[in-house]
Amino acid sequence: MTHKVVVIGAGVVGLTAALYLLEKGHDVTMVAKNIPGDIDIEYTSIFAGANWMSFAQDDEIFYQELDRPGYGYFMNLARNEPQSGVHIIPHHCYFRKSQLVNGKVPYAWYVKESFVENVRYLEKSELPSNEDEDDEFVAGVSFDTVTISTNIYLHYLLQKIYALGGTLKRKTIKHIDDAYNLHHSGEKAEIVVNCSGLLSRFLGGVEDEKSYPIRGQILLIRNSAKKQLFLTTPGFKDESLYIFPRKEGGSIVGGTFIPNQWSGVVDPELAKRMIARAKKYLPELVDPKLGNDPEIDVYRYTVGLRPGREGGPRIERVGSIIHNYGIAGSGYQASIGLSQLVVRFAEEFFNRSKL
Ligand SMILES: Cc1cc2nc3c(=O)[nH]c(=O)nc-3n(C[C@H](O)[C@H](O)[C@H](O)COP(=O)(O)OP(=O)(O)OC[C@H]3O[C@@H](n4cnc5c(N)ncnc54)[C@H](O)[C@@H]3O)c2cc1C
């Protein structure tokens, strides 16, 4: 049976939830202050890398389960839906001596399980040379993952939503209860799905003080590479280096994970460090033989705010409201797992209402 649903938010979390609800046959209106195409510090989804590389620790089964379905979903899009802006690329993760735990390399759960495709432990000769640093690289692993070109993928989701009869209204909602009256049919929505991201802190009726920003500075560059890269940057708290080349060429370079900083202002010294690291650890970016400029060619210096939340994301149903926000740095990779939960909570509610 078709039910009327309003989804607040058109970031990757709201768009994916809306799509999953439409695929179940529901009648969905999305309402959002910012929509695909916008570049606004309040709209996190446009700033993401975005790749699949679960942050879940070995004992964080709930987070592993949120991330798992996204891997196969995005790999499938890369193979079968070129218009999605997703492509498959090997990821190289390097470990330093200081990262060893009891002398062992702390490989992630998805590597140890060979959950991801083409896991390969790297030879010493494949690690970046860093004799000039105290903390040498001692190990590395490669596996296949995706880079999602966020601007293309968000539009792709929206097109799928429109094709299934979903609608989108640009509007700022002051109080969550107002959302019930915004269904495109003019009738009251039966369920509201709150995918307001970081702004859940300010949405009336929610005002979640546990929501906080995790600041990430990024560079968008025209230089391309044949692999993704992740490594730590000792001596620089809250910094690391990641580089995700995109399908259409160019790459995103990060980054920082600085909690509780709301500033969208680019730190120029940090930007210089990021450029120097990109050249040092992934020299193919500036290799003319690969068609690259001999310098890092930055086309945007910017900052995004990940929707952090003390205690983790809020994914629960309270009466006829399903909350789905606060997914921090995992909004793309967890978007499928979260949407599956939204559908389950919605079905539970609709079935209860029938009794
Ligand atoms: C630098 C950086 C790198 C990242 N890299 C990755 C990565 O590699 N992989 C990954 O999985 N994730 C990554 N992320 C995280 C990912 O971007 C976020 O988890 C995700 O974008 C959150 O999506 P969202 O839909 O919850 O929030 P948002 O994209 O912020 O969307 C929130 C929506 O709610 C709307 N809204 C809020 N309040 C209201 C209101 N009152 N009325 C109407 N509308 C409202 C907004 O307008 C917007 O449409 C990264 C993030 C950053 C910043």
Image (cartoon, grey):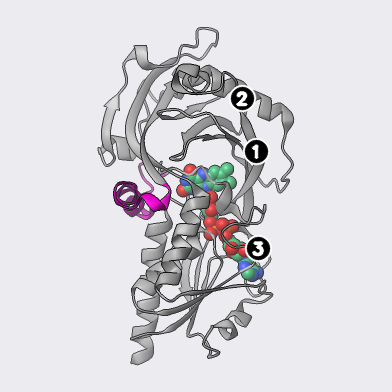
In the picture of the structure, the residue carrying the numbered disc 2 is 275
* Image quadrant assignment for residue 335: bottom left
Tell me the element at label 1: strand
Q: Relative to 261, does residue 341 appear above or below in the rendering?
A: below
Residue found farthest to the top:
131
Q: Quadrant of ligand 1?
A: bottom right
1 or 3: tag closer to the N-terminus: 3
Q: Which residues are magenta?
A: 56-85
Choose between 99 and 232: the one closer to the eye: 232
Q: Residue at x 63, y 63 (%)?
A: 34
In the picture of the structure, the residue carrying the numbered disc 1 is 300
Quarter holding the N terminus is: bottom left
1 or 2: tag closer to the N-terminus: 2
Residue 292 located within the stretch drawn in magenta: no
Residue type beneath disc 2: Ile
Number of numbered discs present?
3
Q: Relative to 205, does residue 350 appear above or below in the rendering?
A: below
Rendering coords of residue 271 (x, y %): 67, 29
Tell me the element at label 2: helix
In the picture of the structure, the residue carrying the numbered disc 3 is 201
Do tag 1 and tag 3 residues touch (Cβ < 8 Å)? no
Disc 3 residue crowd, few under 14, some 14–19, many 20+, Cα 10 Å: some
Choose between 282 and 346: the one closer to the eye: 282
Disc 1 residue crowd, few under 14, some 14–19, many 20+, Cα 10 Å: few
Rendering coords of residue 45 (x, y %): 55, 53
Q: Relative to 156, does residue 90 appear above or below in the rendering?
A: above
Residue type beneath disc 3: Arg
* Image quadrant assignment for residue 236: top right
